[in-house]
Image (spheres, helix red, strand yellow):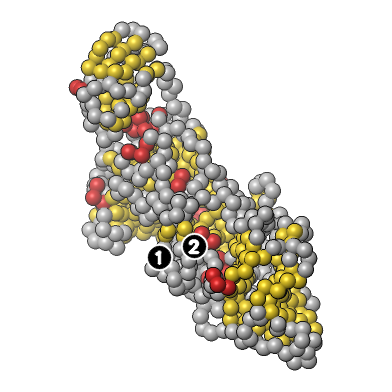
Amino acid sequence: MNHFNFLTKSILLILWIWMIPMLILAQSSAEYSSYGFNFVNDSYNDGLGGWQGTEIGNTLNLNIYKQNDTINDYALEMKAQNQTVQISYDDTGYMDLNPCSFVINLRLNLTQYTGNQDRFSFKLNTGEKLIDIQFQNDGIYYLDDNNNTSLITIAPVANEWFTYTISLEDCSAIGSLMIENDDAKTFPLSFQNDSSMPSIELSTSTNSNTEFKAEIDHLFIYSNPTKWWLGPSVPYGDESDFIGTTGDRQHFLNLPNGERIGINENAGGYVTYTQLTPTGTNLDPFPKFGSGGTKTLRGYFHSNDYNPVQPGTSSTTGGHLVTVNDLTNKLEIEPFPLHLYSNSGIGENTPLVFPTGDVMTYDSSTNDIDIYDEFGLDLRHEIITELDFNSTLENVSENGGISIVKHQAEWEFIRHPCQVLQYHEPLANPRYELNDTPHSDSDMGEMRHKFEFRMNKDLGYEWVLWLENGEWQSMELTEIGQKRTFNTLDVTTIPLENRFMVFSTSNSLTDPNAIAWYYPESDYNAASTVQKNRTNKSIVSQEDRRFRMQIISDWRKTNWCRMNLYIFNKGLLAPNHGDPNEYESFRMEAYQLFGTPEEIWTQIQGGISTAVIEQAKQPKINIYPNPTRGIVHIQLNGLVVETLILVDNLGNDLTNKVKYISKDKEKMVLDLEQLPVGTYHLVLNEQIVEKVQRK
């Protein structure tokens, strides 16, 4: 049913037809990785999972202790006495470390020097370079590109913690060592070429009978992203004047009854434009992060602060630039790495610097409010997570029916744990057993996945409707924080009427402005956890770890309400479990339905076909010159023009300002000199839409 007036429909057709794909810098998975080791020792982990060494289990030589009551504040003691104590970690192929672009953070304390050969060594093979740093009682040394042991600087002070930052930008560059983020203590390093398989080695040695001890608070290795673009928003072609797009790179999904959804390349496919019938855009005029529609994940086991988000930093200041494929009736967001929402317990001591020189800082930017002194990093590195994300939005409306969008999303636990290790300690949430696999702090447990859609309350979206025992119920949201919730523990047995909830501008069952989330018990959802082959992404096995579904509609803040669909699953195993050629991911799909509450319920009862409708093919006409200073020629190519309307980007009808110079079966010539400079849209026969620019 078409509830859209002609003028608004014309504008939507205009926006759709003129979206031209742009060539952008692609994001893909496995472009970088991050290692993270903070040697946690709790009831779920021995602290050295994955590490090899003859002394593992011998607390006289290797011991993990908690430094204080701070969450995750552990340290590894490596104690040598007239011997060498060594542990190593071999990359078995799944971490995809960028071998020539990385930042290493090592927090180290050497408690005392006892003999002439006291030494702590850190060694990393990246696949292209060998990083070999030796902390000795007479200085800090490294193995240079001539295979010589070269002095870097004086020995570190005994019994004091220091953070050492080792970095390299590319294979042809000189690397550096920085101590405590001090430019005066930054030293050039010429690393040795080495094509050995990636591995890490830590060792403590002494020739003294007195114990020599090295304490490691944490070791993080951030691999510099090669395809992660950060920068301010830029216009998408000529569409920067569209209301509600904020000038970002926007892609639109056009629905048959006039509704429209726009996702943003600059923000990881974040929904920053929506058009509902017939009231117009339902978001704020300039939606930023937190004002649109998104998919997020939250790891409850690793405290609520582990919160990788789809958009990255912000839709208007930059973040993830993703590849969006415009397919027929479908927008496909290619896999890209997620980052933590950077206000959730993380603030680095250096700001996020864009290629343009613009700087993004937070109130906590000088404090580094997680417990790690990750000196030498900016936010770009610190908020890297282990997860890749991909998503699709697809028009699955049936001919003549209401508009329906199928959302699918997948979170792939594809990289070695780093961020989860900063939030490992269980609080109130359980750690589930998965496949009888022994757990470690690097696994994910109790993960909440969310599809969110936000509506502008100023446009009337304040009514929630639902079914209860076959009868419609409604509630008007009159106070901030007021909400309606469905909460079901057994996901597989949820009755159909509890799988959807409606938001509308009234409590009328025939109000055409309603929108709903619907969570089906589809094959895709029932096999929500999959094990995949790392090489070709094929599914090796699949299972169902879901244990709760929630739909919550509430009045969140001053002028917007939201409708959230939550699916909880028991967690994902880290990639260092089992076969290194496999990893786990969680996937989820849901439908958005647009229409009246009655139409939405009828559609859900009748089922939703996944066969998409085909866009009608339009005859091609030629317009020239375009842009024009006033006179424009329209070559009709056999088209018989019955009606012509001209509108601006705001939908204003300006047809009365168009003068006909000539008109016949072959061509029309129009005079647009009465129009100011700008972009206008010709609507021919209520279907064909062309853009004309007046310069």
Residue 520 against residue 327 in the figure, above or below:
below
**Residue 301 on image: x %, y %:** 52, 69
**Residue 416 on image: x %, y %:** 63, 62
Residue under numbered circle 2? 379
Is residue 17 found left or right of 429 in the rendered image?
left
Residue 199 against residue 260 in the figure, above or below:
below
Residue under numbered circle 1? 362
Most extreme residue toward the left is: 656
Secondary structure category for the residue under label 2: helix
In which quadrant will I find the C terminus? top left
Q: Quadrant of residue 483?
A: bottom left
Q: Is residue 636 visible?
A: yes
Q: Residue at x 26, y 28 (%)?
A: 647
Mark 1, other Cα within 10 Å: few <14 / some 14–19 / many ≥20: some
Q: State the mark number for residue 45.
A: none
How far is the residue under mark 1 from the one under mark 2?
10 Å
Tag 2: amino acid: Leu
Secondary structure category for the residue under label 1: loop
Mark 2, other Cα within 10 Å: few <14 / some 14–19 / many ≥20: many
**Residue 414 on image: x %, y %:** 62, 56
Q: Is residue 490 visible?
A: no
In this view, the residue in front, 353 or 482, is: 353
Q: Residue at x 70, y 88 (%)?
A: 113
Tag 1: amino acid: Tyr
Residues under numbered marks 1 and 2 in contact, where contact means CB atoms less than 8 Å apart: yes
Compare marks 1 and 2 and give the one earlier in the sequence. 1
Residue 523 against residue 219 in the figure, above or below:
above
